[in-house]
Amino acid sequence: MGDLEIRPATADDIPAIVAMLADDPLGAQRESPDDLTPYLSALERLSRDPHQFLVVADRDGQVVGTLQLTIIPGLSRKGATRSIIEAVRIHADERGSGLGTQFIEWAVEESRRQGCSLVQLTSDASRTDAHRFYERLGFTASHVGFKLAL
Amino acid sequence: MGDLEIRPATADDIPAIVAMLADDPLGAQRESPDDLTPYLSALERLSRDPHQFLVVADRDGQVVGTLQLTIIPGLSRKGATRSIIEAVRIHADERGSGLGTQFIEWAVEESRRQGCSLVQLTSDASRTDAHRFYERLGFTASHVGFKLAL
């Protein structure tokens, strides 16, 4: 396989990112790949926030993965800054290629560069393969994740 | 009981906030109430970030609760903005007073005002009382929360 570059997402990447968000048992129900307007607005909001890193994995000009890293300062744990990884998607053609591991390792390294002492993420209870994946990478399933839709 | 005000935290609130963070079975191990320097630096980082709302519940001039709300724009769910509630603490004297409910309801309303369509939080797997509390408030325990200390 060709070289992998992890770089900030641009408006040109939105169709490929939204296709990956929708190509997923849970995402298929909640995305609108035929109308990219709300995603382009969201990209603008993300670009204005210096604590947001929306990135893509680019292999030879093809977008093959995406994730969002958020840097969150805080008081607890002696004023620790933490990061949250959200919206991780790997293109179907790349599953099993090791890209997921490289990608999460990138997010962990970037969190370190940003001064974080903790990396967090939540994963839907039904994604048991993902849970094993994160545990292999050293994450601990110590918490219950709650959501409330408004 | 006197009137309750929910307001942004200031440097003067830090001793009371840190005392609450430390007065907790998990927090006791990881806070340093005798050295407030790292907390004051963290408050500065929080103050510079317009997506951070560190608040206290103030009853007649006494700080009786704290929580942190973070607003996170994103692409998934049609460009949905979400909020994350972190570091919720209620003073021991106020437990059972209904303050916890009022406080989370405030955070949910503030999330709505900020344009969020989803509120998230994680709670340590050992905090089973907290889990029932969040479920009573309408939250769904749909996710597993992973952490990696750096």
Image: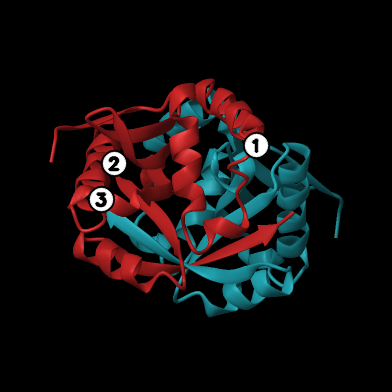
Chain colours: A cyan, B red
Place of residue A130 in the rendered image (x, y in percent of width and height, measured from the top left): 59, 72
Chain at numbered mark 1: B
Cα–Cα span, label 1 and label 2: 29 Å
Label 2 crowd (10 A; few <14 / some 14-19 / many >=20): many
- Image side of residue B105 versus residue A146, left or right: left
Q: Residue at x 27, y 47 (%)?
A: B104
Chain at numbered mark 3: B
Q: Using the image, tell me which numbered label, if any, was put on residue B107.
A: 2
Q: Is residue B150 above or below residue B40?
A: below
Q: Which residue is mark 3?
A: B94
Q: How many marks?
A: 3
Q: Residue at x 63, y 27 (%)?
A: B41
Chain at numbered mark 2: B
Look at label 1 and name its amino acid.
Asp
Sequence-wise first label, 1 or 2: 1
- Image side of residue A31 versus residue B6, left or right: right
Q: Secondary structure at mark 2?
A: helix
Q: Secondary structure at mark 3?
A: helix
Q: Secondary structure at mark 1?
A: loop
